[in-house]
Amino acid sequence: MVPTFTPPSTIIIVGCGVFGLSTAHALSNRYPSTKVLVIDKHAFPCPYTASIDSSRIVRADYADPAYSALGREALKQWAGHPAFHKTGLVVTADGENKYLKDSYNNVKSGGGVECLPGEKDIRGIMAGGCSGTSGYVNWNSGWVDAEAAMRVLYSEVESRENIQFLTAEVSGLVFSGGKVLGVKLADGREITAGVTIIATGAWTPGLVPLHGRAVPSGQVIAYITLSQEETTRYANLPVLLNLTTGTFIIHSPNTSPPTLKVARHSQGYASSTPLFPKEIPREGEDALRDKLKRIVPEFSERPFEKTRVCWYTDTPDGDFLVTWHPEYEGLFIASGGSGHAFKFLPVLGDEIGDVLVGQGRFREKWGWKEPVEGLGDGSKGGDDVERIPLEEALWEGR
């Protein structure tokens, strides 16, 4: 049951990523008399969070009409934002793919969408490279410099009189019976508030019992630095996402330095808590190299400038987990981004604010669901198999 919401004098938000920062922004607007305290282990920008990156895809290209509609609303807000680049998005698959078909049907009426019925058509858009046997291009979509966008939002939130930031490690929650009163810090301090919101991404299951409703999953990413000539030559290259393999590439000519990013949106690697190895698993590196050879052949042998494991917080059905915790009064969860939350940054906070007060179109969709089952929303590539533990994958092939 959703509790009746009365704005408290203080709200704690643990986590300064997409969910935490956007929620702080929204609550500051709605409740100017409420003090919002945002706590994170690292000073902003935290290098480990998924939102601090060179790029993220911005799209309304979803098989689910609800996310497609929210994506269109977000795109309207991104328009004119200095971090957003409307380069277009090529969505492909190897053979028949229901997600591809449904996604196309959800965006085609908006204009700027072209079918790509064969590999020749894909190559024509992708400067000779190819991934997938058919698909479409949506010229309304694009990418955003994720770190730059987060810096803009952080600057705005930081300027609010009713928002404060604290750099400290939260080690647990403060309880009184079945009620959460606030948080415990690693240095022994306790901070109390009327409402405690946990928005710690892949670290959330380590703080709050979620019973499998959201788990960490590690995704491989690699970056190649481009020369000025390469940057100019690929300036108009759209983003590409292959739904069968999960591979996507983003050319970021406006970042410093100009970068080509190749990544895999898949079931990922398992770990009870996020780990950050110096190198990604050999299996993941080989997979990215193989896909790069097909999409941008001239970079297939170039050494990666940097690699990383990016941590999603996956839910069984790919829906976010934004809900009051049913077992603990005063505890609200804002997590479960499942690798597709960043694009909603301009509108996510208000949607979370609606759910907080028991309203909004996503109250049930993002709720505490029974039973816990599923393997995502169909957008992730690769086989639907059990995740390999990251530590095991790191040992193999090294």
Image (cartoon, rainbow, N blue to C red):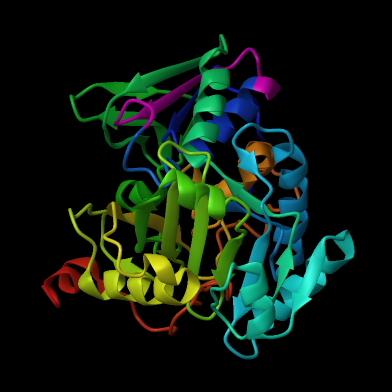
In the depicted view, which residue is nearer to us: 153 or 223? Answer: 223
Q: Position of residue 258 (x, y in %)?
A: 44, 43
Q: Is residue 237 magenta?
A: no
From the viewer's perspective, is residue 187 above or below residue 346? Answer: above
Task: Tell me if I can see residue 320 in this picture.
Answer: yes
Q: Quadrant of residue 271?
A: bottom left
Task: Tell me if I can see residue 325 in this picture.
Answer: no
Q: Horizontal placement of 178 versus 96: left or right?
A: left
Residue found at the very far bottom of the displayed protein? 95
From the viewer's perspective, is residue 197 above or below residue 8? Answer: below
In the depicted view, which residue is nearer to us: 77 or 128? Answer: 128
Name the residue rendered at 24%, 21% in the picture: 189
Q: Is residue 36 magenta?
A: yes
Q: Position of residue 239 (x, y in %)?
A: 59, 60
Name the residue rendered at 47%, 48% in the picture: 229
Q: Position of residue 20 (x, y in %)?
A: 49, 36
Q: Horizontal placement of 12 versus 277: left or right?
A: right
Q: Horizontal placement of 203 versus 282: left or right?
A: right
Q: How many marks?
A: 0
In the depicted view, which residue is nearer to us: 23 or 95? Answer: 95
- Span shown in magenta: 29-45
Q: Position of residue 361 (x, y in %)?
A: 76, 52
Quadrant containing the C terminus is bottom left
Name the residue rendered at 57%, 34% in the picture: 22
Residue found at the very far front of the displayed protein? 229
In the depicted view, which residue is nearer to us: 255 or 194? Answer: 255
From the viewer's perspective, is residue 257 above or below residue 159? Answer: below
From the viewer's perspective, is residue 331 above or below residue 66? Answer: above
